[in-house]
Amino acid sequence: MNRLQRLLLSMTVLVSLPSAAIAFGQGVQASKLSRDLTSAAPFQKVPVIIQYKHDTTQSQADSIRLNGGSVKQQMHLIHGISADMPAYMLAAVANDPEVSYISIDRKVSAREVPFAAPEYTIEPINAPQAWAKGYIGTGVGIAVIDSGINAVNDLSLSPLLPAFLNNLLGNRVVYNENFVTTDNTTNDMYGHGTHVAGLIAGNGSNSLGLRYFRTFFGSAPNAHLINLRALDANGEGTDSSVIAAIDRAIALKDVYNIRVINLSLGRPIFESYTQDPLCQEVEQAWKAGIVVVVAAGNDGRDLNLNPEGYGTINAPGNDPYVVTVGAMRTMQTPTVQDDLIASYSSKGPSFMDQVVKPDIVAPGNLVISSKFPNDPLSIANPTFITPLSFYERNGSATTPSATYFPLSGTSMAAGVTSGAVADMIQAAPSLGPDQVKALLMQNADRSYFPQTSSVTDGGVLYTANYDIFTIGAGYLDINAAINAARVHNGNVPSGTAMSPIASFDPNTGNTYIITDQTALWGKTALWGKADIWSASSVYGATAFETVNGETALWGKTALWGKEDPNAFTALWGKTALWGKGTPDAATALWGKDNSGPIDPSASISPLLY
């Protein structure tokens, strides 16, 4: 049995195991409690999200208070309440037949990895060709749920207007709201949100003119932004802060024509996406007509489970509805032929549900975007610079830009993709989220990828296979997607564009992608599975085999077969998933401290390869 087969089989076995006994209380329906709740001390107050089968009522909120809890907010779209509850009371709450699931109100964090050299961003995705047709995101609102957005020049109304007039007229950040409980500002106190906003909608004001030979644009340089601050000065938030921000984006959808939500954040997966409150919330936005773009995560170098970083997708990128984006290295050239996957980019299939992720990949490594005076990320990392010589005529190679700096991560790739989606929606406003996702994936570039790429760092070999769990449907090509949308004139088959599920069949030795019956994949010849996940994007696949309507990806030896010298016996041991002594913390996969924010002062540049 090969590595992928063991990965899928192990996931299936683990999901089918009964939940651990709950240490605080008897008679509780353990299946209603997330596993990371069971280690709480009985009298410890735990921040939780309680999901109900129907919309919440005042009596349920009152019941929480009577049982020693404090209600923080009601989440009507997912029938939930966030509250601080004594751990010993969770047993009684879970026994309520109206309660469907209780989970910790977990921390989420920005998904960036700073570094010091510049790369290309908009050229590899063919954005200039789309702009030449007039598609620059005009009229499209993008909700940026992040650490805030500061009013930098590149988010001005027009790069052609003088600065004093832009200051007088305002900028393209049309709405600001704070969901962080530790302060009252909507300003970016971390530096991540402004950088992401520039990648989405920067118009190059700080690098446009005869003085410059290169201008730093976002992929939708005329889109307007809705600043929903959910991450604090450490780049950290909670499920509930992000859910509240998504609620607001849905409520403001028609006011600001919000058609895209960018989530350059994530956290480990603790349960099925069908129970995860954050995943349930992004589905509500999707069903409201908003394309949700999510960072895949930066854990592709986590080799605790297997030698190649599989199974490391973050939530809510594991949800099959959303567009989940991995990060590419553009190798300091504007063309794609030499581009490689970033070794830290998280890979599928998703833990628990085995969802095939990411959906696509986009430039995310060392990409340049806006910074502001006293930008915390920039100050904490003085070597992360964009030299003036990279874009200014006669600019110094040793003097750093005061307005731009590079960051790396799937956060950045998500931002690039969100802007591209806005261009596409301007070109074809009638497209719904599923149609946008389908067109992005069908028209992704997968013509040039190598079979593998590797890098050695610190004596460790990091290898990437260019399969659907690494690159998804391929490299974002927004010009091709827009051309296809215009040809179809918005006439794309109806149905969902849910990402498929990977399934290993021990009887045949094949791994299959199983598509949801409501999905548009396969509804016509044009939208067949092979048109989205072609053989060229699957390393080692010589042909697709169809059995009972499902597409086989790999035969017994096509990928990681017996001839693979790196094959190993198990991806998860008896204690690897939850860790010895900490049965409710995913210490092996995510590390003891990885649920928190990335430390901007840490030396993490070796992650960038």
Image (tube, rainbow, N blue to C red):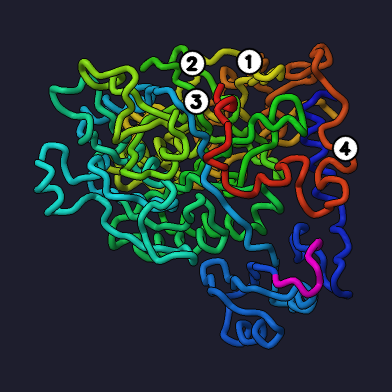
- Give the Cα separation between the discs numbered 1 and 3: 14 Å
Q: What residue is shown with label 3?
A: 328
Q: Position of residue 10 (x, y in %)?
A: 82, 38
Question: How many neighbours does mark 4 have within 10 angstroms: few (below 14), some (14-19), or many (20 or more)?
Answer: few
Q: Quadrant of residue 418?
A: top left
Badge 1 marks a residue whose secondary structure is: strand
Q: Please give the range of residues in magenta.
A: 38-45
Callout 4, which amino acid?
A: Gly
Numbered mark located on residue 447 in the image: 2
- Give the Cα separation between the discs numbered 1 and 2: 20 Å
Q: Position of residue 161 (x, y in %)?
A: 10, 41
Question: How many neighbours does mark 3 have within 10 angstroms: few (below 14), some (14-19), or many (20 or more)?
Answer: many
Indicate which disc, 4 or 3, sits on the residue closer to the N terminus: 3
**Above/below status of 176 relative to 216:** below
Q: Nearer the viewer, residue 202 or 128?
A: 202
Task: Provide the major secondary structure of the magenta segment.
Answer: loop
Q: Nearer the viewer, residue 560 or 231?
A: 231
Numbered mark located on residue 573 in the image: 4
Answer yes or no: do the residues labelled 1 and 3 have beta carbons within 8 Å?
no
Badge 2 marks a residue whose secondary structure is: loop
**Above/below status of 435 relative to 175:** above
Callout 3, which amino acid?
A: Met
Q: What residue is shown with label 1?
A: 454
Question: How many neighbours does mark 1 have within 10 angstroms: few (below 14), some (14-19), or many (20 or more)?
Answer: some
Callout 1, which amino acid?
A: Ser
- Give the Cα separation between the discs numbered 2 and 4: 38 Å
